[in-house]
Image: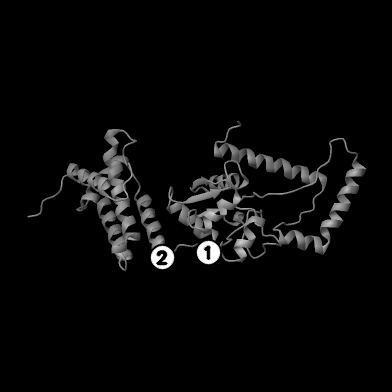
Amino acid sequence: MTAVLSVADAFAYCEARVKSHYENFPVGLFVPRDKRPYVHALYAYARAADDFADERMYEGMRGEKLDQWEERLHAAYEGRAEDPIFIALAETVRRLDIPKQLLLDLLSAFRQDTVKSRYQTWEELIDYCRANAGRVNMSSAGPGAASHLGGVLLLQMGKFESLHVPYKGGGPSMASVMAGESHWSIAPAPAAMAAVKSGRLRAIAHSLPQRAGLFSDMPAVAETVAGYDYSGWAGVVAPKATPKPILDKVHAALARTVSEPAVREALGNQGAEVSIRSPEAFRKFVEEDLARNVVAVKAAGLKAE
């Protein structure tokens, strides 16, 4: 005769599991008391799956354990839960109407962790971020830096999540990615090129609106996230009342200069792509860039001090 564990006992088991694990976090303390059992059940489910993916005792059988965990998940949604964690989980998903796909995505992310630690393409990284909401870090040179605003804009347009980790400058931000503390970052090409060429960083996409001569073999982020365009730039401006003939003369001289092969090569070595625009086109570009930054600043929740 088999005794069936009660839902109350199953929730108590999950709570004890949460509190006894060496990677214990104050799970449930910041939600209403009547919701804590559901948080404990979800955490126990995720905690066990994470252990299968990275604890040494499961070496050589990680995939098998995660497959078995998925089978138990399907059984729980079909009303056939037997394991204490899944008895509590079944009650949790019933009460809170949690789609099964969310929990399957979590297992998919853990499976990726067992076979891959570096991503070859931007599509792979986005897939990983979407399956690991809350577990992926995006480094930046600090709040309000271009790497922060460009990253926030990408998160919003790409509809995926990453935790922003601000550093004091671009150097420490890049170092965090090289050390594995952060998963990804948007960096100015000049700051990243040396590390990319030495193999310490992998460049998987650039933020220009389309493939460019300098990065002809590298896809643009916009190929995956339509409309994304965020990059640093330098331009030449003049006082508002400058006569047009003088503007035209300066523009022509600058255009000739940056068209010189030696100048283009020197700029390219610094990660700069030459773009010659008319004064009218440059004004339009600046206005569009300001509009993009307004969106990014609002999305980042930044306030003027």
Q: Which residue is drawn at 28% across and 44% down?
A: 40
Quadrant including the N terminus: bottom left
Give the residue displayed 64% in from the left and 42% down from the top.
292
Q: Where is residue 288 in the image (x, y as percent from the top left)?
A: 69, 42
**Badge 1: how crowded within 10 Å, few (<14), some, or many (20+)?**
few
Q: Which residue lies furthest to the bottom in this view?
A: 60
Which residue is denoted by mark 1 in the rendering? Answer: 120
Which quarter of the image is occupied by the C terminus? top right
Q: Residue 302 carries which label?
A: none
Question: On the rendered structure, is 297 left or right of 254?
Answer: left
Foreground of the two, 286 or 19:
19
Residue 187, position as x, y percentages in the image: 61, 53
Determine the secondary structure under disc 2. Answer: helix
Seen at 44% across and 64% down, the residue is 116
Residue 64 occupies quadrant:
bottom left
Report the label total. Answer: 2
